[in-house]
Image: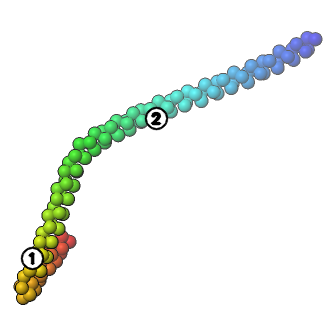
Amino acid sequence: MIFLIATVFIAELIIICNIVQFIIKTDKAVCGLTAQVEKRRMILKWRMNALREIAEGLNEICPKLLVKFKKTKRNILVRAANELAQSIILLFFKPKYKKILLGTKTGIGMAKKLLRV
């Protein structure tokens, strides 16, 4: 009977040692993960501030870009109207003046394109 009690006691000690070792390993793993989460939290905080600054910058830039796009649109419309007016004027001139005006217009257009390059 004493041998049975001794065997059960030794088995309980072995089980308790395994449980304690498992708890210690789990505690170390949790501590390591907590440290990693703290590092990532700081990085996330920094990134969140950077995104906030970018968003504020975009809020300042967007109205200026819209104004610029409106001006560009207006300029394109003025150029198109100018070319249309020139084409209409060319239709109503006499044939000998048409060639001169058409040549001048073509030369000016090619000069503008060559100077842009």
Residue at the disc numbered 1 = 89
Q: Please name the residue shown 31% across and 41% down the image.
A: 55
In the displayed structure, 13 sits above or below 113; it is above
In the displayed structure, 98 sits above or below 113; it is below
In the displayed structure, 84 sits above or below 8; it is below
Split into 4 quadrants, where in the image is the N terminus?
top right
**Residue 88, how many percent across, how many down?**
12, 75
In the displayed structure, 58 sits above or below 8; it is below
Q: Please name the residue shown 78% across and 18% down the image.
A: 13
Q: Is residue 8 left or right of residue 72?
A: right
Q: Residue furthest top?
A: 2
For marks 2 and 1 on the same chain, the one whose residue lies earlier in the sequence? 2
Place residue 10 in its image quadrant. top right
The amino acid beneath tag 2 is Arg
Split into 4 quadrants, where in the image is the C terminus?
bottom left
Tell me the SS state at disc 2: helix
Number of marks = 2
Q: Is residue 64 left or right of residue 55?
A: left
Checking the image for residue 40, the label placed there is 2
Q: Residues within 10 Å of mark 2 (few under 14, many from 20)?
A: few
Q: Residue furthest bottom?
A: 96
Q: Residues within 10 Å of mark 1 (few under 14, many from 20)?
A: few
Choose mark 2 or mark 1, whichever is in front.
1
The amino acid beneath tag 1 is Ile
**Residue 85, how many percent across, how many down?**
11, 72
Residue situated in front as seen by the camera: 6 or 86? 86
